[in-house]
Amino acid sequence: MLVFQTCAAGYDGVPVFRSVSFSVGEGHLYAIIGRSGCGKTTLLSCAAGLHALYAGTVSRAGEVVHEPHPRIGLVPQDPGLFPWYTVARNVGLGLEIAGLSRRSAGYRQRVEQALQSVGLLHCAARLPSKLSGGERQRVSLARTLARNPDVLLLDEPFSALDALTREALQDDLVQLLSVRRIAAVLVTHSIEEAVFLGSRIAIMTGRPATLHELDSEPAGKPGRWSRTDRAYAEQCRRVRELFAEADHD
Amino acid sequence: MTDGRTSLLRRFRDLAGGAVILVAAWWLLALILANRVLPVPPVVFGRLFDLLPEPLLSHAGASLGRVLRAVGLATGFAVPFGILLGRNRLADSLFSPAAYLMYPVPKIALLPVVFLILGVGEAARVGIVALVLFFQMLFVVRDAVRAVPASYVRILSGMGGKPIHTVRFVVIPAVFPAILTGLRIGTGTALAVLFFAETFFTRYGLGFFIIDSWSKVAYTDMMAGIVSLSVLGILLFTVLDLLESVFVRR
Ligand SMILES: Nc1ncnc2c1ncn2[C@@H]1O[C@H](COP(=O)(O)OP(=O)(O)OP(=O)(O)O)[C@@H](O)[C@H]1O
Ligand SMILES: [Mg+2]
């Protein structure tokens, strides 16, 4: 469970966003759509304990987040894999920092499992430079998953992927959230993605930005839509209209 | 791994090919000049084997020892200092301009000063070579540290990493190839400086041996010394190359 309470943050005293309040429970995903530069990455940095708030609090499981927490995982916008380590070592980096030995069975098992869950176990021994852009993003996701987070912060993690791979990964993510009981915040540019994955959808707009939640209906679980459904297409259209309205002012 | 091995083989093949061409050119030149100052390769190589193991090995050993100590000394200073300049803007703006001005200054010209300060012993000969290597490495290390994206540090922090983890997982892996590059760029100049420094106040080292043979009109010995110094340079270069191909993965 992740809770934002009247949060504000920015750079050099100038707020980028203000009065941001929302919460997301386990198995749910909070989708945030917004234009480039509106402050989405900054918002996730605050939740990851990497950026100080001007006002308000972010809390996980009832505890205020001041610094990075082992169960809060951020998948950054730029995969940022270390070019000098193999894929496997990159994925295990969080475990190494946590003090696990690279020779321990636990380490190996968790790295393998994380790679498996993004379908890249066969790339374990490769260097990141030998991967495609999309594969790198998946490794970045695996690196975060290996730490077994219960809060997942996703900063446009699927932006460099082709439509088919993206959909496959979205399906995997739906599985992960419910199996591992993860609470997730997803930042995206794609309305379709926000609708498909989001329990709730919010638009981030204005300067400083505020959040506007689009649906007042009770939050549905991710994965309740089928991509070929009429209803899904209809929902995407509705959200697009609401987005145009909200983004206008 | 197969990649590494084939490229190693290729490297040795290139090295051997290059050596053959060089010796052939030398031979040709010797035949054209027909002067006893430049003996033909078989004569020199024959003499080389006469001079081995002694006295040539002692001279080569002395030179190699000096180079290795200079490498250690220069690395020991250039790496921490380069990291400091790369990560601390104040230190960089304070020291980099001065260091930058020193970069093109021929350090060998400072040899008399170094002899006066450190005395005419080993310390000065090692010191002057270390000085050359230090400046070669300093900027390569600084730039390597600077080129590390800030996002890497953020990623580690996000996973609960502390500054020690940044050093271990980011700074050292980023700097290591830079050290090798700096050393490789510096090898040629370092040996030139060593050669010159070995012609003063010592009876050991290939520099001494070459100049001594020259003054004794022992041109074949002189050429054998020159070949030995060249081999030493190629050896150092190859070792750096090997280290790079084994440890630096891209
Ligand atoms: N380190 C920084 N110092 C000062 N301003 C910054 C810094 N990082 C970001 N900003 C500014 O804060 C605002 C929000 O940036 P942020 O990265 O959160 O946007 P974003 O919504 O993630 O954009 P995008 O969709 O392009 O990733 C931008 O106007 C940006 O210029
Ligand atoms: Mg962003």
Image (spheres, coloured by chain):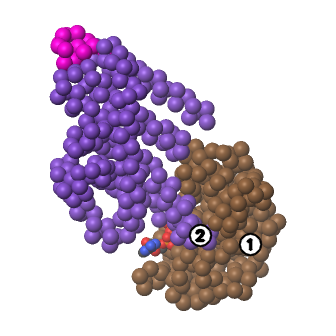
For the residue pair B156 and B243, the one nearer the viewer reads as B243
Q: Amino acid at mark 2?
A: Gly
Magenta stretch in the rendered image = B28-41
Chain label for disc 2: B
Colour chain B is painted in: purple
In magenta segment, residue B204? no
Q: Gap between marks 2 and 1, in whole Å? A: 19 Å
Q: Secondary structure at mark 2?
A: loop
- The answer to whether residue A21 of the structure is visible from this angle is no
Which quadrant of the view contains residue B89? bottom left
Mark 1 C-beta to ligand 2 under 8 Å: no
Q: Residue at x 64, y 79 (%)?
A: A213
Q: Quadrant of the N terminus of chain A?
A: bottom right
Q: Residue at x 29, y 28 (%)?
A: B226
- Chain letter tied to brown: A
Say whether residue B6 is left or right of residue A95: left
Mark 2 or mark 1, whichever is nearer to me: 2
The residue that label 2 is drawn on is B161
- The answer to whether residue A30 of the structure is visible from this angle is yes
The residue that label 1 is drawn on is A150
Say whether residue A88 is left or right of residue B242: right
Residue A153 is situated, as x and y percent measured from the top left of the image, at 64, 70
